[in-house]
Image (spheres, coloured by chain):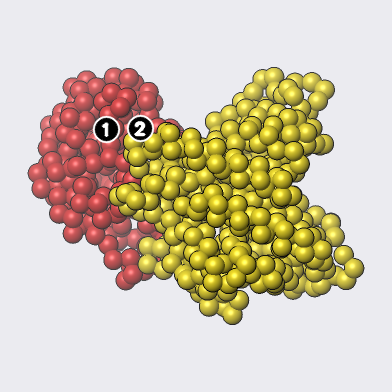
Chain colours: A red, B yellow
Amino acid sequence: MSVANTMSSIVVDNIRVDLIERGDGRPLLFLHPGIGIEPTTTVLDRLAARWHVFAPVHPGFEHSEQPKSFDTVDDLAYFYLELLEHLDLRETVVAGVSFGGWIAAEIAIKSTERLSHLVLANAVGIKVGDRETRDIVDIYSISEREFVELAYFNPDVGTHDYKTMPDAQVHAAARNREATARYAWSPYMHDPKLKSRLHRIRIPTLVLWGASDRILSETYGRAYCAAIAGARFQMIEHAGHFPHLEQPEIFSDRIFAFVEEMPR
Amino acid sequence: MRVYQFSEQPYPDAWKDHGGSLRVNLPNRRCNPKIAADLFHRYYDEWLLADELGLDIMLNEHHQTATCMSSTVIVGLSVLARQTRRARLLVLGYPIGHRQDPLRVAEELATIDVISRGRLDMGFIRGVPYEFPCSNQNPVGVMDRFWESHDFIIKAMTSHDAPFNWESKHFHYRHANIWPRPWQQPHPPVWSTTGSKSNARALGERGYVMATLGTGYNTRALYDVYREGYMSKGRPAPTADRFAYLGLVAVATNEREAHERGERVASYLRSIAIVHPPFRNPPGYLSVEDNARLLRGETPPRSYTKDRRVIDMRSASVEELINAAILFCGTPDQVYQQIVDFCEYCGGMGNLLMMGHAGSMSHEDTVENLTLFATEVYPRLKEYRQPPAVAVQPARRSPVAVAGQ
């Protein structure tokens, strides 16, 4: 398999999405957060050093097609079930971060037929607190600067200079913001029914949690974990809402270790 | 020309202590209901005066804001449909993409049309960016919802012989059959606002009245796209009554007093930007291309003076606002000429939406402004002959004046 930092595209159900594919061995489907994914990001190489990584760009994000009818995470989950069939992936580790974790959970409640393990990292998607408690910081009510300071252990990691960024990347960032809102504006960043369906997940599940996340609380992460029978909760220090970016080695190693230790 | 008197029904005391945001998150403890009551009664009195003076009336609504206490336009319309005698009542607008229930919208507006005996003009709008955190409607794809809501409302107003069924993406009804049905047939005139060419074309194709707000000497391009859309459906060039423009108006017997009044009306523009910054640009409100430009720190200029200088209407001087046709201000002669010059530039503009009150303007100030305009300017505007309808052919975009229309 190719190890170049290239992006190809794939058509599933007449929807064209970009796909980063790298490495060899056991398949791992990596589902990126709302901020998108860069092909050069370290975590993909770390994971691809041992496994066959598939990191699609969600419909509507970056330069992937936005199907007119897609407006819920449910739509994305069904799309990825199709993609798993299309690529004939079996015994797949599905790992998602933040918004990608929500998609991963929505996939797993529908079918784990092609899944071996589930990894949810600082995942959104469920409602935990009471009706007047917002579980998830309203990212549309704060500036990008405030977001970066809440989301990262080291805010420098998430700070971008759009003035010097290539046009295509700025365009992708604008598209990511719009796409996230399309799927997650209301109910805000969650599906009210997801939590009560998580019990359907009967494959080994690892909940990873960047300890410095101030978009989501640890309580939220532990509630997510508690709703999935036998799921394991592990903190990652010196990381915030996007542990795959701030601690890519630890993030990858925890997944490798979990999968080895917990055969399906 | 028709002239509609417009006020946002502000709560001006809020300007004294707003902590950087007049909209969405300004705690309502700052609102004294007794002061609000006095203001409402005063604003309705000023509209009753407008009715007596021969002016028409425009109302709007915004939410969770001290800049506009009218949080549902139906309340103001209900009061004025009964209390005014002759003025047309323009709602501009009704944010139908935000409303949960377009059946209710159709019922309300049809009722207003009946009570007013056919004086309603119904403007449907997308709503400003700050409405989305209030209504919680998803700003992404809101125009799709807007047009479905529009289609349903028109269908409800024009279906008379049996209840109809509606099962579509956004709305579901099993027995739609509004009572009463509207007075005006087939339905009250539809208006909308826009600042974008794609929407201007869509409005032109439907032949609706198109209003722009504060676009000044940058308006013509939008009008021409409207003309193109209008004529693409096999119609002759659109006449001036298809176009509306919201301008601030300050008239006084001498120029000095007029400019002082102009500064007070312009306080509306000064307050537009006073809102917590993240609420100014919800995701999906602007196109991806525009948002990419914003990320790069570029902001597209919106206001131009007659001689093509770019101004920022939030901070521009009274002189600059006059030069940009955002503010019509001066003696009656000057105001008449400024409006006529603007109509000529537009190739015809038949509906002036006149902001004759804003901010903390007193009742007396407002009454004098409206009265002078209605007695010294408006009669001449009624006599004014709009320029011939301008044809913009769908195939080639060059405007051509059509004689005799």
Q: Whole-Å distance between the Cαs marked 1 and 2? A: 10 Å
Quick check: B340 left or right of B252?
right
Element assignment for label 1: loop
Report the residue marked by disc 2.
Answer: A190
The answer to whether the residue labelled 1 contacts the one labelled 2, judged by CB atoms less than 8 Å apart, is yes
Q: Residue at x 26, y 50 (%)?
A: A147
Position in image of residue A62 (x %, y %): 40, 54
Q: Quadrant of residue B33?
A: top left
Report the residue marked by disc 1.
Answer: A135
Q: Residue at x 35, y 40 (%)?
A: B30
Q: Amino acid at mark 2?
A: His
Quadrant of the rendering where the N terminus of chain B is positioned: bottom right
Position in image of residue B108 (x %, y %): 65, 29
Q: How many marks?
A: 2
**Is residue B210 in view?**
no
Quick check: A109 left or right of A243?
right
